[in-house]
Image (cartoon, coloured by chain):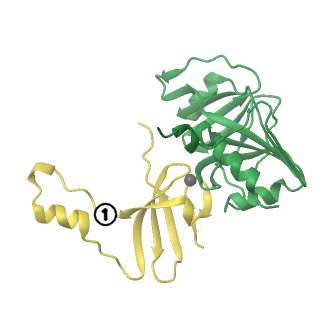
Amino acid sequence: MRDFAQKWTAFPEWSEAELLRDGWRARVVPGLSQTLVSGALDKAWAQLGPEGAEVGLWQIASPETPYRVRIARDRALLVSPEAMAFDPGWHADGWAATVADNSYAVLELEGSETRNVVSEATTADLDAGSPSAATLFAGLQSVLLYRTAEARVRLHVESGYLPYLWRWLETRPE
Amino acid sequence: MQRFPCPFCGLRDETEFHYGGEAGNDRPEPAAEVSDQGWAEYLHIETNPKGRSREIWVHMTCGEFFLLERDTVTHEVFASESLRRAAP
Ligand SMILES: [Zn+2]
């Protein structure tokens, strides 16, 4: 009988996975609280708490505190290093909050070469920026791309695509 | 490479967008009363103008649908306008 397990991309133990390359390295950021917020965002933020700045493409967030990654006109991902207290589901004033802790895997790339690696994966104009952090990245349709320091990048990728994106980074020619 | 302006995100590469059809080609209603000829025109007959055109596009990464006015010969973009309605 054919072993169908063989056709899936092999992947490492994420908690220990690390790529060390000339001028950049990559790892998976575990344990972040992620909440997908959709609908009337102004009403949502009034309920969820005003703390946390909003970041778009290539903008710099402060990772020690909660922040909002803008995806679309009516959608953002609320990210926090600590668990967040909120009522999930639909809210009568026009917005919804969805637990997304495991929906997105978070990759961190760091080092002086990071920008070159990112530039190979996306056509977005990093210097021009964009209100939305979502972009086509290494062929994946909607990856969230922003920074947490000048030369440190965070990528939120749908969890199922993490093995592919990891292999893309791993096998990228130096 | 061509770049389109998403009304929300700004300029992005064309590879992030998907064509949705010619603007104004509205689906005929009510469906039960539409003739075969009417369906065929809606589904298959394009104006396909050479020059200035009005088209529906969607920005795949953010989901915004918008009206794009562009020139199909020179690729010049004249306007892009969100098709979203304000919440009631
Ligand atoms: Zn957009």
The chain whose colour is yellow is B
State the image coordinates of residue A95 (x, y, percent, origin top left): 51, 29
State the image coordinates of residue B30 (x, y, percent, origin top left): 15, 49
Q: Is residue A56 visible?
A: no
Mark 1 element type: loop
Q: Which quadrant of the structure image shows residue A36?
A: top right
Give the residue displayed 62% in from the left and 28% down from the top: A102
Give the residue displayed 75% in from the left and 57% down from the top: A172
Left/right placement of residue A16 relative to residue A73 reads right
Q: Disc 1 beta carbon < 8 A from ligand 1?
A: no
Give the residue displayed 62% in from the left and 44% down from the top: A9
Q: From the viewer's perspective, is residue A46 above or below residue B34?
A: above
Left/right placement of residue A149 relative to residue A52 reads right
State the image coordinates of residue A117 (x, y, percent, origin top left): 78, 57
Residue count near mark 1 (Cα–Cα under 10 Å), binned few <14, some 14–19, many ≥20? few
Task: Tell me how many marks there are.
Answer: 1
State the image coordinates of residue B65 (x, y, percent, origin top left): 45, 54
Question: Chain A's shade in the image?
Answer: green
Give the residue displayed 74% in from the left and 46% down from the top: A146
Q: Is residue A41 visible?
A: yes
* Front one among B56 and A110: A110
* Front one among B66 and A2: A2
Q: From the viewer's perspective, is residue B8 above or below residue A173?
A: above
Q: From the viewer's perspective, is residue A63 above or below residue B15?
A: above
Q: Chain of mark 1?
A: B
Amino acid type of the residue that numbered disc 1 sits on in the rendered structure = Gly
Residue that label 1 marks = B24
Q: Which quadrant of the structure image shows residue B20?
A: bottom left
Quadrant (top left/top right/bottom left/bottom right) for the C terminus of chain A: bottom right
